[in-house]
């Protein structure tokens, strides 16, 4: 039996540390960008109002720091992604280049929206997050390996335990996190059920 090509087992790369609790989705992507017809280009707008002043002048901000450009992992704190349930928030983060997020806790809908587009979301204690963020700040070129099967983050010869919802972990490892793709792959069965429904056919 071959692995599902959609399976996500690990993410390897440098990390971007973003500090602060209760970071809501309106901060991640301002409401005016919800008018976008597609998600294209949202990566450039992530944290737009924090990153630039009213004149478009760049502010000091982790997402502007060239030190962290190319980072694939985002380290955050408590209740990240709280607030309104906009799927544009994880889309903007993903299109910036982030492949996984590790934090103390997340807004429930935000976390679900992340998983639906293939961004693994891990949780860890406040102490662990402080250590990870500090490591990324002191040595930005540190390579972190997030292992979904082992539920750990490995770096510089260390291994630190992480947590993840068990059903989410199973979906990521099995490649079944993309529910739309799963639906499309079972179109024959869907059409078969459709043809049998009396309130669609036979009247």
Image (cartoon, rainbow, N blue to C red):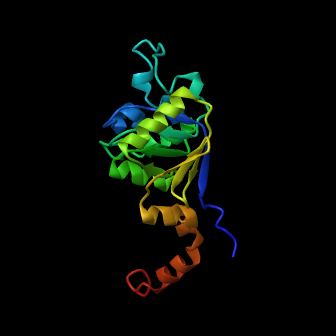
**Rendered location of residue 60, percent (x, y):** 46, 17
- Position above or below: 168 against 31: below
Q: Quadrant of the C terminus?
A: bottom left
x, y percentage for residue 40? 55, 38
Is residue 103 at least partly visible in the picture?
A: yes
Q: Residue furthest front?
A: 157
- Is 45 rendered above or below residue 1? above
Residue shown at 58%/78% (left/top)?
A: 188
**Where does the image place residue 130, in percent across and percent down from the top left?**
42, 36
- Residue under the image location 58 percent in, 29 percent down: 140
Extreme right residue here?
A: 2
Q: Is residue 203 left or right of residue 161?
A: left
In the image, 147 versus 31, the foreground residue is 147
Q: Is residue 124 above or below residue 139?
A: below
Q: Nearer the viewer, residue 44 or 8?
A: 8
- Where is 189 relative to 112, above or below? below
């Amino acid at each position: 039996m071959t692995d599902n090509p959609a399976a996500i087992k690990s993410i390897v790369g440098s990390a971007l540390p973003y500090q602060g609790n209760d970071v809501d989705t309106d901060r991640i992507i301002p409401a005016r960008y919800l008018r976008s017809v597609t998600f294209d280009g949202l990566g450039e707008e992530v944290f737009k109002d924090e990153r630039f002043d009213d004149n478009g002048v760049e502010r000091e901000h982790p997402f502007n720091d060239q030190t962290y450009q190319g980072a694939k992992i985002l380290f955050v704190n408590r209740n990240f992604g709280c607030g309104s349930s906009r799927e544009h928030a994880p889309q903007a983060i993903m299109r910036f280049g982030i492949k996984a997020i590790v934090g103390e806790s997340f807004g429930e809908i935000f976390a679900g929206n992340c998983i639906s587009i293939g961004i693994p979301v891990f949780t860890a204690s406040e102490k662990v997050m402080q250590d990870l963020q500090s490591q990324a700040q002191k040595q930005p070129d540190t390579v972190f390996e997030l292992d979904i099967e082992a539920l750990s983050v490995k770096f510089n010869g260390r291994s630190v335990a992480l947590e993840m919802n068990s059903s989410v972990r199973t979906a990521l490892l099995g490649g079944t996190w993309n529910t739309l793709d799963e639906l499309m792959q079972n179109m024959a069965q869907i059409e078969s059920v459709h043809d049998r429904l009396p309130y669609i056919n036979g009247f």
